[in-house]
Image: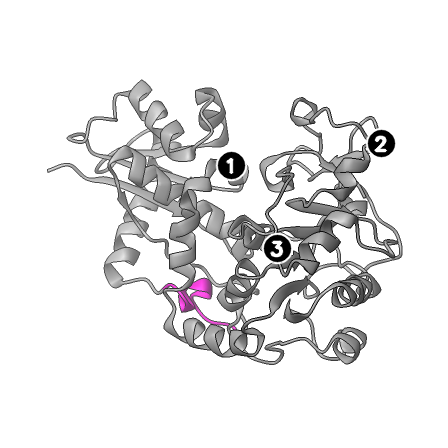
Amino acid sequence: MSLRVAYPTVTDCGLGNNLMAVAKAYLIAQSCQLKYQPPVWPPTIHVKPATKNGYGYYFPSSSNDRVRTALFAYSLRLQRKLKFRIGPPVLEFTRESYERTRIQDIGEACLGYLKGLGFHDPVRSVVVTTGGMWGGYAAIKRARVWLQSLLLSHSETRRRLEELEAPAKGRLRIGVNIRMGDFKPWNGTFEEGERVAQLPLDWYVRMCRLIREACDCEFILVTDGTREQLRPFLDEIRPINYLGQPYSDLLGLLLLSRSDLVVCSNSTYSRLACFLNDKPYIWISDTLVRDRSNGHGYLWKENGTPRTSRIKAVPVKDDASREAIRRCFALSHKTCALPEGLSRFLTSGGAMPIENWDDLLYGDAVFLM
């Protein structure tokens, strides 16, 4: 009997990073006729109060999970060090292997990789492990529904989600993600491609003030900040929030993924939430890498270099683009008025469809407004 397994390599990083690895392993299992092996989660500073198993608080491992994962990891170490293996071969599906296939979907790419090695046959035993954020969201697009179900699998989170969403019933829901925590404080300047830095709080206040002027809405705050840090925002905007409540990692993602508009932080947490959400989002344009025209920008890549081949030939001075309802509104921290397209979307109560689907998450260059 063959043993065919796919399992993700998870780390002590944040949830947005790790769920990408989990989604990769799931899709590989689906495409390659493997069994998906849930990970054994390590401790992490991001889960508060601290637990011995980090995100395993939400996704607990069985004793069998722990034994199997330990054996796979041990076998992989032996293969690397001694070129000797115990049990089925353990293959790492790496970025290099993925890119060589020239297939976007991670599952189908891995199937092509296994075919090249002769391990695509379902009667042959093989263990495939993968991790990291390479490949981006386009590689895991097929996993969106599964990830939503995974987030909803934690019963306590589901209960709290229903309680927090109740006051916003029937109104436009604006999710606001303000990242504080381990992000460095804003120093008054921006760098292109900058990450893990807080955004100015007055930008969030101004955005929400403009949104409130345009529509009848309820703001839902998702944050790892404290009341003291967020006092100006809380006093003026008065959002629905769960400040002070423990174990809210999944709760925040779900609230943002179900919002009608998301005002993002510059974080993988916001990116993952928008990936799970088909509605518009606002991204601060000052942190984006700009193209040669200085009129379009896109997310920082792992090597710090924009993929210029993905930039779309949209004229910078195109009034129609300012009026479009966009998937991504890239707005400056100095913005004092909403673009026409965003106002149209809000005044329609979120009923009007997106007209321009250029999306940072999939490597597109978006219009800077």
Q: Quick one: label 1, few (<14), some, or many (20+) residues within 10 Å?
A: some
Q: Read off the residue under disc 2.
A: 317
Mark 2 or mark 1, earlier in chain: 1
Stretch in magenta: 50-59
x then y, percent, for residue 132: 51, 42
- Residue 313 vertical position relative to residue 205 in the rendered view, above or below: above
User: Is disc 2 in contact with disc 3, using a CB cutoff of under 8 Å?
Assistant: no
Residue at image location 78% in from the left, 80% down from the top: 235
User: Is disc 1 in contact with disc 3, using a CB cutoff of under 8 Å?
Assistant: no
x then y, percent, for residue 35: 25, 44
Q: Quick one: label 2, few (<14), some, or many (20+) residues within 10 Å?
A: few
- Residue 160 vertical position relative to residue 97 in the rendered view, above or below: below
x then y, percent, for residue 95: 49, 31
Q: Quick one: label 3, few (<14), some, or many (20+) residues within 10 Å?
A: many
Q: Nearer the viewer, residue 362 or 72?
A: 362
Q: Per the image, is 51 magenta?
A: yes
Q: Read off the residue under disc 1.
A: 138
Mark 1 or mark 3, earlier in chain: 1
Residue 356 lies in what quarter of the image?
top right
For residue 119, which numbered disc appears in the image?
none
Q: Is residue 251 left or right of residue 228?
A: left
Residue at image location 38% in from the left, 63% down from the top: 59
Q: Magenta-highlighted stretch: main secondary structure?
A: loop
Q: Quadrant of the C terminus?
A: top right
Q: Is residue 88 left or right of residue 320?
A: left
Mark 2 or mark 3, earlier in chain: 3
- Say what secondary structure mark 2 lies in: loop
Q: Nearer the viewer, mark 2 or mark 1?
A: 2
- Residue 233 vertical position relative to residue 65 in the rendered view, above or below: below
